[in-house]
């Protein structure tokens, strides 16, 4: 089994961040002025992928912290709409809840 003993380079750390931000391998390679194969090779390194995973988890946690207070308000509004005597509001609320839970495809 191959093990990596040296630390990740600043370029590898930047590549990990760019991948977490959603850039494609070809875009990352272009920004860093390396070949795509270099990025693929880095992705095979456990230390590199551990950093990608850590950064993704941190990003996900940050987004949850930002959106949770708003989501609570949204859910309260949807609950009020569900209880509404206005059938259009109730149907909109049901449709929205189903889409949020992945039970209906997103609107285009």
Image (cartoon, rainbow, N blue to C red):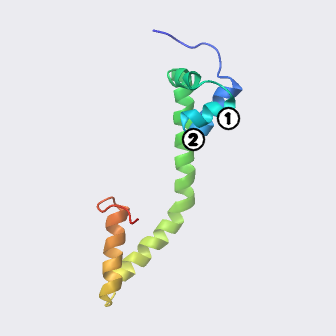
In the rendered image, the quadrant that contains the N terminus is top left
Which mark, by number, is residue 31? Answer: 1
Task: Return the x and y of residue 88 as percentages of the image width and height.
Answer: 33, 85
Identity of the residue drawn at 35% across and 78% down: 92
Left or right: where does residue 19 sit relative to residue 101?
right
Left or right: where does residue 30 sit relative to residue 43?
right
The mark total stands at 2
State the CA–CA distance, disc 1 to disc 2: 10 Å
Examine the rendered structure and indicate whether residue 4 appears above or below residue 16: above
Examine the rendered structure and indicate whether residue 37 appears above or below residue 17: above
Q: Residue furthest right?
A: 10
Identity of the residue drawn at 31% across and 90% down: 85
Quarter of the image holding residue 25? Answer: top right
Q: Residue furthest top?
A: 1
Task: Return the x and y of residue 42 as percentages of the image width and height.
Answer: 56, 23
Identity of the residue drawn at 52% across and 28% down: 49
Left or right: where does residue 57 sit relative to residue 77?
right
Identity of the residue drawn at 52% across and 48% down: 60
Task: Return the x and y of residue 54 as percentages of the image width and height.
Answer: 55, 36
In the rendered image, the quadrant that contains the C terminus is bottom left
Residue beneath label 2, please?
23
Label 1 CA crowd tier, 10 Å (few <14, some 14–19, many 20+)? few
Which mark, by number, is residue 20? Answer: none
Given residues 33 and 39, the one toward you in this image is 33
Quarter of the image holding residue 29? Answer: top right
Quarter of the image holding residue 20? Answer: top right
Left or right: where does residue 83 sit relative to residue 17?
left
Which sits earlier in the primary sequence, circle 1 or circle 2? 2
Whether the residues at callouts 1 and 2 have beta carbons within 8 Å, the answer is yes
Label 2 CA crowd tier, 10 Å (few <14, some 14–19, many 20+)? some
Examine the rendered structure and indicate whether residue 41 appears above or below residue 61: above
Regarding mark 1 in the picture, which secondary structure is present there?
A: helix
């Amino acid at each position: 089994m191959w093990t990596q003993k040296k630390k990740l380079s600043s370029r590898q750390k930047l590549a990990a961040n760019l991948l977490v931000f959603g850039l494609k391998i070809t875009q990352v390679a272009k920004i860093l002025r390396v070949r795509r194969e270099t990025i693929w090779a880095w992705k095979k390194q456990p230390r590199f992928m551990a950093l990608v995973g850590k950064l993704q988890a941190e990003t996900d946690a940050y987004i949850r912290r930002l959106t949770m207070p708003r989501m609570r308000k949204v859910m309260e509004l949807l609950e009020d709409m569900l209880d509404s005597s206005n059938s259009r509001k109730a149907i909109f609320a049901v449709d929205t809840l189903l889409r949020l839970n992945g039970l209906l495809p997103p609107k285009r």
